[in-house]
């Protein structure tokens, strides 16, 4: 088993900021890629350079608006495999670091842009954030309670699933293609495209059932008792996800209503069955249900708080919650690597760097002298 990671030997220059791009490069870094995050020092005050998505990376400052800063950038790009950026469309062209300019220096470069609405189309260049991308894609309309306003989720679905993860997929596909062709390529990732792609099952169910997609009122969202959430006596919640009848019938038998088994998706009986289940689950606290339902062949789970999930033995055993020692010597909880490879596993080797922490060492690594670096500082290049 190698401790280098599957992407050992791959170098990434990451010009992105905030969450989508840095999440993408974090995944690459977790699996062994050398990731150098590059930011203009003007953004130090609003940077998230110490956040968890910067683990396993180096961080340097560089002013790409300066001629000397671009010269340093192109010197570094010659030996890079991947360039990641998250500017609005057109910004890299104005800076002189667009794909065409970069590919002219390094034809093997894999250049990935992650933006809100993509490089083409009527929304190109419009500002936005996670809630906006989910809104345009129709995803937000399906989140929340029935007959209530849409609810913005407490996690960044468009940023991470729509942007960051698709960025990783695109980069890995391009790396595989480069192994065959020897050529790099450009990757256009739209967080809104990625959000729309999350509707694959919802759209399929709409076609299958003929029912319109409504908030909290579909086969996989509260319409039926078999796929629902229920409050317990102590104001906690549990979820039932018994899509198949072989999981639903045992629950009906357990509650002494076997006749509800065949009526799992009966629209005339669905409110009656949901009312029955609500009353039953409201009769005991969550801890008792955990005991009573243990071993029952039903798809169910307690709704954990984030703190409870982080303290769970499940995620400790799966190494999804680990202790990571920061520069100050204090260990802090970090989320682990979800993709488990048997021969080249990913790992968390270093904590997030401080803003610009590695600027001097990286420049020296690329051959710049102490005198040149001092000049860069004086000129505002770094």
Image (cartoon, rainbow, N blue to C red):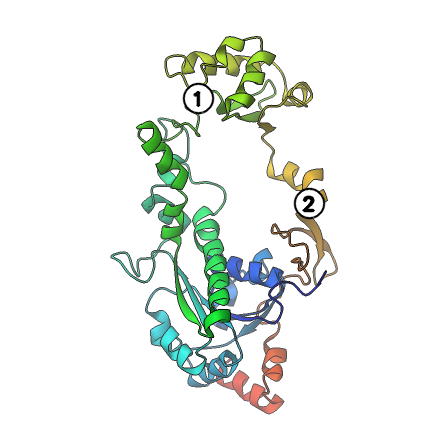
Residue, far right: 329
Q: Nearer the viewer, residue 59 or 97?
A: 97
Q: Is residue 328 visible?
A: yes
Residue at figure coordinates x 59%, y 23% from the top left = 298
Q: Label 2, label 1: how many angstroms apart (C-alpha)?
A: 33 Å
Q: Residue at x 36, y 76 (%)?
A: 100
Instruction: Mark 1: give few (<14), some (14-19) or many (20+) Cα within 10 Å.
Output: many
CB of mark 2 within 8 Å of CB of mark 1? no
In what element is the residue under mark 2? loop
* Count of all numbered marks drawn on residues in the image: 2
SS category of the residue bearing label 1? loop
Image position of 180 with respect to 363: above or below: above
Residue highlighted by disc 1:
224
Query: Label 2 crowding class (10 Å Cα cut-off): few <14, some 14-19, many 20+?
Result: few
- Residue 264 position, x and y percent, is 46, 18
Residue placed at 67% from the left, 63% from the top?
350
Look at mark 2 in the image and give the residue it sits on: 318
Task: Tell me residue 180's x, y (percent).
Answer: 48, 70
Between 96 and 106, the one lying in front of the other is: 106
Q: Say which label, 2 or 1, has the lower sequence index.
A: 1
- Considering every residue shown, the one lying at the far left of the view is 122
The numbered dot on residue 289 is: none
Seen in the picture, residue 128 relative to 310 is either above or below; the reply is below
- Which image quarter holds the N terminus? bottom right
Residue 98 seen: no
Taking depth in this image into account, of 348 and 368 the one nearest to the observer is 348
Image position, residue 316 (x, y; %): 71, 44
Residue lying furthest front in this view?
180
Q: Residue at x 46, y 77 (%)?
A: 63
Which corner quadrant of the image does residue 126 belong to? bottom left
Task: Estimate the x, y position of residue 173 in percent, counting from the top left.
Answer: 47, 61
Q: Quadrant of residue 199?
A: top left
């Amino acid at each position: 088993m190698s401790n280098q990671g599957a992407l050992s030997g791959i170098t990434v220059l990451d010009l992105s900021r905030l969450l989508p791009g840095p999440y993408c490069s974090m995944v690459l870094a977790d699996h062994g890629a050398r990731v150098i995050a590059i930011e203009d020092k003007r953004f130090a005050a609003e940077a998230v350079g110490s956040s968890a998505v910067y683990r396993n990376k180096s961080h340097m400052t560089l002013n790409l608006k300066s001629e000397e800063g671009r010269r340093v950038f192109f010197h570094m790009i010659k030996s890079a495999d991947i360039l990641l950026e998250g500017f609005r469309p057109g910004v890299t062209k104005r800076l002189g670091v667009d794909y065409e300019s970069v590919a002219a220096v390094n034809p093997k470069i894999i250049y990935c842009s992650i933006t809100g609405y993509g490089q083409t189309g009527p929304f190109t260049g419009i500002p936005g954030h996670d809630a906006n991308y989910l809104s345009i894609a129709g995803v937000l309309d399906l989140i929340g309670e029935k007959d209530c306003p849409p609810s913005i989720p407490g996690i960044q679905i468009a940023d991470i699933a729509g942007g960051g993860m698709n960025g990783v997929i695109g980069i890995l596909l391009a790396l595989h293609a480069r192994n065959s062709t020897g050529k790099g390529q450009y990757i256009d990732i739209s967080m809104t495209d990625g959000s729309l792609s999350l509707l694959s099952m919802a759209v399929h169910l709409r076609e299958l059932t003929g029912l319109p997609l409504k908030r909290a009122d579909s086969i996989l969202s509260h319409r039926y008792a078999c796929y629902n959430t229920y409050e317990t006596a102590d104001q906690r919640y549990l979820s039932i996800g018994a899509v198949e009848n072989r999981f639903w019938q045992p629950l009906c038998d357990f509650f002494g209503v076997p006749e509800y088994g065949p009526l799992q998706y009966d629209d005339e009986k669905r409110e009656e069955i949901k009312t029955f289940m609500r009353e039953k689950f409201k009769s005991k606290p969550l801890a008792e249900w955990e005991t009573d339902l243990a071993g029952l062949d039903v798809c169910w789970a307690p709704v954990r708080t984030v703190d409870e999930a982080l303290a769970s033995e499940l995620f400790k055993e799966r190494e999804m919650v680990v202790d990571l020692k920061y520069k100050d010597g204090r260990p802090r909880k970090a989320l682990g690597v979800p993709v488990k490879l048997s021969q080249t596993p990913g790992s968390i080797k270093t904590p997030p760097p401080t803003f610009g922490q590695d600027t001097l060492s990286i420049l020296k690594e690329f051959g710049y002298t102490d005198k040149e670096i001092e000049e860069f500082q004086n000129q505002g290049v770094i």
